[in-house]
Amino acid sequence: MLKITDLKVSYGMIEAIKGISFEVGDGEIVTLIGANGAGKTTTMHAISGLLKPAGGGIMLGDTELTKIPSHRIVSMGLAQVPEGRRVFALQTVEENLTLGAYTRKDKAGIAGSMEKVFELFPRLKERRKQMAGTLSGGEQQMLAMGRALMAEPSILLLDEPSMGLSPLLVSEIFHIIVEINKNGTTILLVEQNAKRALAIADRAYVLETGLITLSGTGEELANDERVKKAYLGG
Amino acid sequence: MSDKKKLPAFLSDKKYRGRLTSFSMVLIMYIVIEILMNTGNLSSLFTSLLVPVCCYIVAAIGLNLNVGISGELNLGQACFMSVGAFSAVCVSGSLASSVPDVPRLVISMIVGAILAAVFGILIGIPVLKLEGDYLAIVTLAFGQIVKSLITNMYLGIDEAGYHFSFVDNNVELIPGGKMLLNGPMGATGTQRISTFTAGVVLVVVALIIVYNLMFSRSGRAIMAARDNRIAAESVGIEIVRIKLLAFGISSCLAGAAGALYGLNYSTLIPAKFDFNTSILLLVYVVLGGLGNMNGTMIATIILVLLPELLRSMQDYRMLIYAIVLILIMLLTNNEMVKTWIQKAYLRLSTDRKGR
């Protein structure tokens, strides 16, 4: 579904991504793990069009994404949940979700998507009239995910959904990610919490300072000595 | 079953309440002022301020759309008024003999509005692609450029057509022709065709445009882009286009306001729309509350009228003006003062109930 070949991204003189290739198959959960500054978020932003890559290709199905502006990528079925719970703080939960469907025109379909999001995140339904800025951290993360789902994407990019959340909430979020995947959405997950990410991933890649150093199934990597030592604390 | 009557949707919903307040405020003020004017109870000073107040309100509402809703600082709103004013004066001057007053005013205002919007969009396209306060810097510079340009512009019309010059006045006119723009002296001998009714209509039109935009899909997108640029891009909002829409409408309204302003005076100098005027407009917006159109209207009315009404106090008037500014700022924006007032109000109302 998503195929990245020899992707390079630079910030001015600094090459943040030095040519990486990976694939996300239909219906899979694929995770990119790595430490701070490995280039995870940069990769995400390059895929969703927020950054212009310096080289390489990004194919979504049969379409080359590198030449397409970010606002059109969403309507092609690729939605991103940006890092750090970026909700529209001064708008209500409902308005945030409506904005998630910004690229869609079918009113009935949008209402249906909103019902689905509320089913997935019942807490958002309780707070539908509340300002997004007054939600707790976990709820804001749920809202950011729900908002991305409003575009009915075929592939969802999640950037560090566990960041700054309590262990209990992290479990809940990961449970929901599996749920979203079961409903037919392919998932590309970027995480620092390698243990959790590898536990739900079909396949995984390890990103280190702009290069992919390891790859395999989630289970393989979780049992790999090098991964254990570097990311799983033992 | 509760017998409490439910408010109709347009009263209970926040977004309609603001609109209703605005329109009823404008309507009531219009009626009161018309009655006062027709019964001869309005001083000539006050009457002369009616049209300028309407102009400033419209320009400030436009500025609030750009600064409050779209979150882009603009330090040159007055120069868009200037573009509108001087183009309207030229249009009106050229059509003076052939078109009656009311349609001429409308045409001039439309031309002024469109020209200001074109300038706004031309500056906006490169600048709004950047993140940060670049628009403030560029509009600041644009204000100076427009002022210098108009200060050096000579435009005359006679039977042979338009005569234009940028150098000292070397425009030679056939007898019977007249100067539309006269360099540093600006526009002179303009026929005064602006009316208070036109001003009120313009305010209402501006409110309709701004409110409809604010509560539309595009309006929510504009606010989303203000609150969080990356998240807005991630849901597929085209940031530059949507910010350009807000900025274009903002400068368009300033242009229309400027046109009305220009046609309200027989002479108008380019220096009238300098940096100070832009800052004053920004003061109206900030004091009225970012994104709050009712507040903007009230702040504009008070702050335009105040220095004029205090004219009898001569040297002290700007001092009082400054004190009032600070007081409004404290009352509307200082949390401590606000809670103190709320507490005092609560105590008063419970005392009354206790008795």
Image (tube, coloured by chain):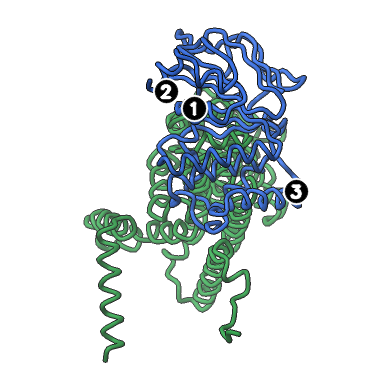
Chain colours: A blue, B green
Quadrant of image for the N terminus of chain A = top right
Disc 1 on helix, strand or loop? strand
Q: Position of residue B136 (x, y in %)?
A: 44, 33
User: Label 2 lies in what chain?
Assistant: A
Q: Amino acid at mark 2?
A: Leu
Name the residue nearer the viewer: B111 or B213: B213
Which of disc 3 and disc 1 is earlier in sequence? 3
Residue B294 visible in this rendered orientation of the protein: yes
| Residue appearing at x 46%, y 19% in the figure | A34
Q: Which residue is mark 3?
A: A109
Residue A232 bears which disc, if any?
2
Name the residue nearer the viewer: A142 or B234: A142
| Residue B310 quadrant | bottom left
Left or right side of B203 for B323: left
- Determine contact: label 2, label 1, CB under 8 Å: no
Which of disc 2 and disc 3 is earlier in sequence? 3
Determine the residue located farthest toward the bottom in the rendered image.
Answer: B355
Disc 2 on helix, strand or loop? loop
Name the residue nearer the viewer: B277 or B3: B3
User: Label 1 lies in what chain?
Assistant: A
Residue A191 bears which disc, if any?
1
Q: Position of residue A158 (x, y in %)?
A: 56, 32
| Residue appearing at x 74%, y 44% in the figure | A105
Name the residue nearer the viewer: B68 or A108: A108
Q: Amino acid at mark 3?
A: Gly
Q: Amino acid at mark 1?
A: Glu
Residue B193 visible in this rendered orientation of the protein: no
Which of disc 1 and disc 2 is earlier in sequence? 1
